[in-house]
Amino acid sequence: MSASSPSYPPVASLVGVFGGTFNPVHYGHLRSALELVEKLKLEQLSLLPSALPPHRDAPNCSAERRAEMVHLAVSGESRLVCDAREMQRPGKSYTIDSLIELRGELGAQQSLCMVLGCDAVQDIAMWHRWQELLDWAHIVIITRPGWQLPRTGQVAQWLKTHQLESSALLRQRPFGGIIVEELRPLAISSTEIRDLLASGRSARYLLPQPVLDYIQTHKLYC
Ligand code: ATP
């Protein structure tokens, strides 16, 4: 670099974590994850399978198998990884606990985004210590066909209070802001895949073939 080259401030890096039951993981999750990595220029996005989701019936497929399917789905795409930390924690899998652990590992200055689908935002006020989530990470809400953000009530007010004007602001502080990202709409759900498989129909092309092969090998969802 010549002595006269302009010097730019270092661009802060951004990493993300995308929690879910992933029962099983499908292209709605995966394509959204990849589009988000590219749109926000995330260094990495970790898919975080919930071992014991606090607000729904225990999944009919073990946490280890769901994590293995996520692992298979992201292999070969280095920007997406499977974070199986919730398998190691006993009891209910509270997102706040994972964010606190991640913050401890990343340090105070690293920008961290937690990714949530619009449907998950609907009941966020039932989450354990939900109002503290923004003390540890930003929240990136991704659109999902058939779901809208709440327009009234305490969650709508919370969104309004913390929403950032631009995604560039995610790099200016490590946590505390909310953005909404509109991604390619893919009307795929794990529920539909489980229903297809349980009724003997094909779920091909809704999820990666290695995941489908794994489901067949282990006779899941039949
Ligand atoms: P289920 O049908 O069992 O409720 P799901 O398809 O909603 O499962 P989850 O594992 O519960 O999948 O979702 C994890 C996260 O991914 C949630 O934040 C959810 O909003 C988001 N998500 C799931 N499917 C899509 C999709 N097709 N498009 C965008 N976001 C999605």
Image (cartoon, rainbow, N blue to C red):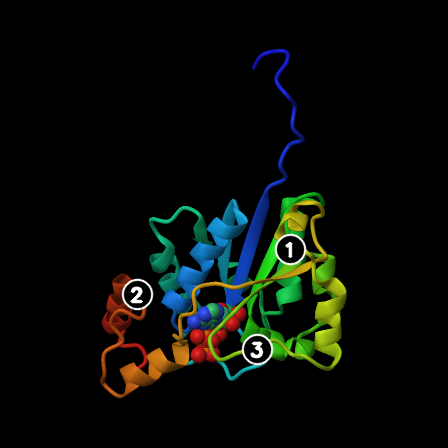
- Name the residue furthest top: 3
Q: Quadrant of the C terminus?
A: bottom left
Q: Nearer the viewer, mark 1 or mark 3?
A: 3
Q: Comparing marks 2 and 1, which lies closer to the viewer?
A: 2
Q: Which residue is found at the position 62% from the left and 66% from the top?
A: 95
Mark 1 — residue? 101
**Crowding at label 2, few (<14), some or many (≥20) Cα neighbours within 10 Å?**
many
Which corner quadrant of the image does residue 185 belong to?
A: bottom left
In front of the other: label 2 or label 3?
Answer: 3
Badge 2 amino acid: Val
Left or right: 221 as drawn, with respect to 92: left
Residue 187 position (above or below residue 44): below
Judging depth in this view, the residue of 139 and 103 nearest the camera is 139
Q: Residue at x 58, y 80 (%)?
A: 55
- Asked if the residue at tag 1 contacts the one at tag 2, i.e. Cβ–Cβ closer than 8 Å, the answer is no
Residue 56 drawn at (x, y percent): 54, 82
Number of the label disc, if any, that sits on residue 211? 2
Assess whether mark 3 and mark 2 are in contact (beta carbons under 8 angstroms).
Answer: no
Above or below for 207 versus 198: above
**Relative horizontal placement of residue 65, taking residue 13 as reference (left or right):** left
**Sequence-earlier tag: 2 or 1:** 1
- The picture places residue 211, in percent across and down from the top left corner, at 30, 65
Type of the residue with mark 3: Gln
Image mark for residue 148:
3
Q: Nearer the viewer, residue 148 or 57?
A: 148
Spot occupied by residue 107 in the image (x, y as percentages of width and height): 68, 44
Per the image, label 2 sits on a secondary structure element best described as helix
**Which mark sits nearer the N-terminus, 2 or 3?**
3
Q: Nearer the viewer, residue 64 or 178?
A: 178
Given contact means CB atoms under 8 Å apart, are the residues at marks 1 and 3 in contact?
no
